[in-house]
Amino acid sequence: DAGITQSPRHKVTETGTPVTLRCHQTENHRYMYWYRQDPGHGLRLIHYSYGVKDTDKGEVSDGYSVSRSKTEDFLLTLESATSSQTSVYFCAISESGGQGEAFFGQGTRLTVV
Amino acid sequence: KQEVTQIPAALSVPEGENLVLNCSFTDSAIYNLQWFRQDPGKGLTSLLLIQSSQREQTSGRLNASLDKSSGRSTLYIAASQPGDSATYLCAVDHNSGYALNFGKGTSLLVTP
């Protein structure tokens, strides 16, 4: 299994609070991704990174920010959590972006109350 | 925008049957197509990756085919087992080549 660790695995937070999810990889892959998975919508890309300090937006980036200060870590921050951000969040890695095989973490279940 | 569709959304078969899951995509300019398996409450497990220059890939009882020109892929599962019960997801890369677009999956139930 690819070495991807997401933390925390479960979190309940209140509306309006900031939340940071962490993805840590041991594979030294260049590309890292954050997706959210919701019933009826499937997996949707939030943000991705193609190198240290290099990030770009996905299709559902509003309300989210990311940072990548080291190859192995990719952080997703919800600046002010809303109930619509209740979801399961997945981190993924790939050695060569869309041209290579992607590997996923176990997910973080976030509930905003 | 690349759209990925998976049919059927759900499928129930008795153990031992061979079955086919379908995936279609709207933009044929892809680098690759990947099939994943997802068990309830778990992450995605990569099953097969087909590069755009390939026609098919095989792993054990799984065989995935790719017809880029028609925007279609199939995942064939031979001699299905209850342990195959899961959601199967198809994904193709964005035209930009940076990330994956996913279908909504096929939920498979194999009954003993």
Image (cartoon, rainbow, N blue to C red):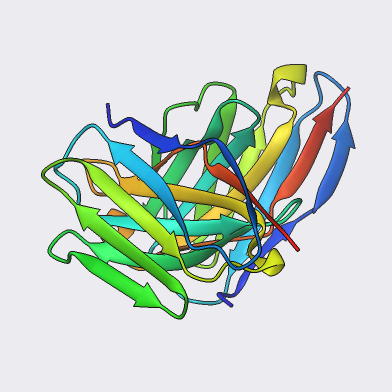
Residue visible at 60% across and 25% down?
Answer: A40
Residue visible at 55% across and 75% down?
Answer: A2
Q: Can residue B69 be seen in this view?
A: yes
Tell me if B83 is positioned left or right of A54 in this view. right
Residue B1's image quarter?
A: top left
Tell me if A99 is positioned left or right of B102 in this view. left
Q: Is residue A113 above or below residue A48?
A: above
Residue visible at 48% across and 69% down?
Answer: B78
Q: Is residue A54 visible?
A: no
The quadrant of the image that shows the N terminus of chain A is bottom right
Locate residue B99, reporting x and y percent.
Answer: 35, 47
Seen as rendered, the residue at the extreme bottom is B60
Locate residue A52, reporting x and y percent.
Answer: 41, 58
Quick one: B92 or B109, which is closer to the camera? B109
Locate residue B29, reporting x and y percent.
Answer: 14, 43
Q: Is residue A95 above or below residue A40?
A: below
Residue visible at 50% across and 58% down?
Answer: B36
Q: How many labels does the image show?
A: 0
Q: Is residue B22 above or below residue A103?
A: above
The quadrant of the image that shows the C terminus of chain A is top right
Locate residue B19, reporting x and y percent.
Answer: 48, 57
Tell me if B12 is positioned left or right of A16 in this view. left
Quick one: A92 or B51, which is closer to the camera? B51
